[in-house]
Amino acid sequence: MARTEYVGVDTIAGPFLMLGDIRGVGYDELVEITSADGIPRQGKVVLVDEGATLVQVFSGTQGLTPSGTRIRFSGAPLEIAVAPSIIGRTFDGLGRPRDGCGPVLGGERRNVNGAPINPMARLYPRDFISTGISVMDTLTTLIRGQKLPIFSGNGLPHNRLAVQIATQSHLAGAENFAVVFAGIGIRHDDAAFFTSRLQESGQGNNLVLFLNTADDPVIERIATPRLALTAAEYLAFDLGMHVLVILTDMTSYAEALRELSVARGEVPSRKGYPAYLYSDLASMYERAGVIRGGQGSVTQLPILTMPNDDITHPIPDLTGFITEGQIVLSRELDARGIYPPVDPLKSLSRLMKDGIGKGYTRDDHPGVSSQLFAAYSRTQDARALAGVVGEDEINETDTKYLAFGKAFEEHFIAQGIEENREIGQSLDMGWYLISMLPAAELTRVTMEELRAHVGGDAPK
């Protein structure tokens, strides 16, 4: 129920309004702000102290005056309307419809702040999610209920990869699969690309899209991922769906959090980010998982651009601590025209071992992935040696590793944006690449297994 309206504020500073002591106001409470010209805005309470209440305005304070500003406290936190009809809809960064189809009807309103899943209620993630991308499905497998970030850099094709994953991903054997896609601080051309590509792919029937563009108020970016996760939790735990949440770009979110922290006058930590960046990121990443006894699941694939390609930067560094691995995009592979430019040696899926093999993908998956990884690692040594002494001076084994590495990058890692490979196709391709290696180098698979898959093409 709406509360009494207050006229006038004490101070306006940046995106904040400072008011005096207001009884009964709660942290994160939604606020309606009206300027002297009658234009409404939204905000939320970010600080409650004795004698002072601080309100953050989502769309900025430009045009507001201390004496002419009206404040109405709602008594409730920021919420989003949820109903089965949100599937196929497009919303802005604050959860307002931007597809021209009107408000969400016939549902309920949910607090967007949510809460991490209780560890005692979690079921260990095991089921394989197919992305249709060979290097991910085979070497850094995504598991239902996992949180697996993609570490990218400015100019790398993470947006194309995000769309491809969104359009191709599915949980093996599950029809009730949905994708919640959130663009955070993205450019207008990227927003148009996401919208058009996702609609053209026919994914509209199982997609919920949230778009916060670069010219939207920076403070709105704090809310966008939480809105997306709240929608995903509703679809998963109320409707029993398996939901993949793609958040891009989490660096924009962290930058907004830093700007908000500076405006509050908080003491900065590493590189100017607030000391609570870790716990803030964890409050969102830990909303992924499978609940014991439930039917649905939430899987997260957050995407972040590493400033200056620095994987030790606070954003990827802290993200790596919270999540279960990472997929790292390579600028070197991208420069050579290889898409998607995933670097297998820097990438890792910590839950992969429990979601592949018999009963999940194929019996030979663990051996193939292990042998491919070992061989590609050995290829880097052969390339380093060839760079010093020349390719003509290296031995036959190293020469075969160079040929393997070239074929692995150009045919296994590389695939078109429209190419959707089943896991069986990717594993078969892996066996033929393994057959390029000398028999003595096969340490993770047996010759009998190799002959069973490639026949006469097996090495002698």
Image: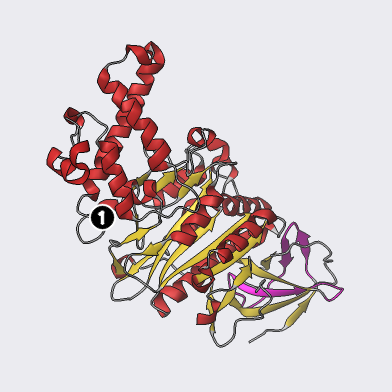
- The secondary structure type at the circle numbered 1 is loop
**Residue 153 occupies which quadrant of the picture?**
top right
User: Residue at coordinates 14% horizontally, 39% vertically from top-left?
Assistant: 446
**Residue 16: in magenta span:** yes
On the picture, is 361 further left or further right than 387?
Answer: left
Is any atom of residue 95 visible in this view?
Answer: yes
Is any atom of residue 50 visible in this view?
Answer: no
In the depicted structure, whether residue 161 falls above or below residue 38: above
On the picture, is 286 further left or further right than 449?
Answer: right
In the depicted structure, whether residue 8 falls above or below residue 158: below
Q: Which residues are drawn in magenta?
A: 9-38
**Residue 292 occupies which quadrant of the picture?**
bottom left
**Residue 268: in magenta span:** no
User: Quarter holding the C terminus?
Assistant: top left
On the picture, is 221 further left or further right than 437?
Answer: right
Query: Toward the viewer: 121 or 150?
Result: 150
User: Residue at coordinates 25% horizontally, 51% vertically from top-left?
Assistant: 353
In the depicted structure, whether residue 42 falls above or below residue 346: below
> At which x and y percent is residue 184?
60, 57
Q: Which residue is mark 1?
A: 356
> At which x and y percent is residue 330?
48, 37
User: Residue at coordinates 34% horizontally, 52% vertically from top-left?
Assistant: 141
> At which x and y percent is residue 371?
25, 38
Query: Toward the viewer: 209 or 386?
Result: 386
